[in-house]
Image (tube, helix red, strand yellow):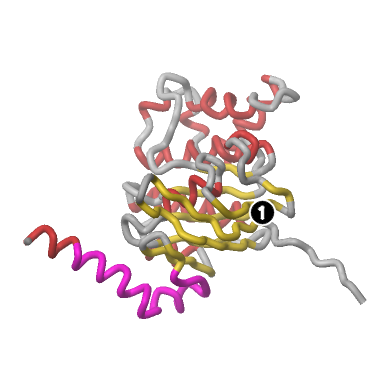
Amino acid sequence: MPTDTVPPFFAAHGLSKHFGGIRAVADLSLEIDQGEIIGLIGPNGSGKTTSINMLAGALHPDSGSIRLAGMALNGQPAHFFARHGVARTFQVPRLFRRMSVLENLVVPALSNPRASRAHAERKAREVLEFLRLDRLTHEYARALSGGQQKLLEVGRALMLEPRLILLDEPFAGVHPRLLEQIIDHIKALNRQGLTIMIVDHNLDAIRSVVRRTAVMARGVKIADGAADDVLRDPDVVHAYTGSRKDREGRAHG
């Protein structure tokens, strides 16, 4: 007797991307459960950035599919992904530097034609209070520290009311004290039911937040499982140490 199957909350199957003759990502498949928090790690040049760009709609894969709750997303522009619940941040925050902190949050909310300015401002103030940035409401974005800018970028993504948020290096270049605050916010958002993927090089920070980690090397996913198990995997260890030795060898060659 046939049974109905529930599709994965978010699923990428067989994603590949080439730039000329260079293979950036090959046959990437990844499924994420609703409410899950997952890490995506790998050495430099492993394909993480290309992957997150495809998963957010900024790049179209050469092949493969992307689905959110069964709805096909691949081939659609980034704003389609965002409108249907996939938000992302960037390695280098893309803020309106000459706008205030509050205005930076209001702008993405107004991309929804049904949103009023008053509603957007109320929501923006709630987000700023949650992120503990409310004391900076009227400061220019360019006046914020690097870590505060990362938090503000998370806030901009939250203004889109996402179902899935892709965080691209949220821990990079952040003061240790603010790093702990960012980790606390990520955990709080996940407890509220938000599905989260984190791409970062800070393995200690990743391990403190996620229970599951996927690892890429040279454009291929080489591991996917419990974070502690994955980080002890010989292939993962070799991907990091081997890449480092390769770089050192080229530097001294």
* Res. 235 image quadrant: bottom left
Could you say where residue 31 lies in the image, as x and y percent from the top left?
61, 63
Is 252 or 151 nearer to us in this picture?
A: 252
Q: Quadrant of residue 253?
A: bottom left
Q: Which residues are magenta?
A: 222-246
Residue at label 1? 192
The N terminus appears in which quarter of the rendering? bottom right
Residue at 44%, 29% in the rendered image: 95
Residue 126 visible in rendering: no
- On screen, 95 above or below 30? above
Residue 237 x/y as whole percent: 33, 74
| Most common secondary structure along the magenta stretch | helix
Residue name at image x 37 percent, y 26 percent: 142
Q: Amino acid at mark 1?
A: Gln
Number of numbered markers: 1
Q: Position of residue 127 (x, y in %)?
A: 59, 37
Question: Circle 1 — which element?
Answer: loop
**Left or right relative to 241: residue 78:** right
Residue 38 at least partly seen: yes
In the displayed structure image, the side of residue 68 where residue 244 appears, left or right: left
Is 62 located above or below residue 8 in the figure?
above
Q: Nearer the viewer, residue 123 or 164?
A: 164
Does residue 27 belong to the magenta stretch? no
The residue located at (69%, 27%) in the rendering is: 112
The spot of residue 137 in percent (x, y) is 50, 27
For the view shown, which residue lies furthest in the right direction?
A: 1
Packing grade of label 1 (10 A; few <14, some 14-19, many >=20) is few
Residue at the farthest left position = 252
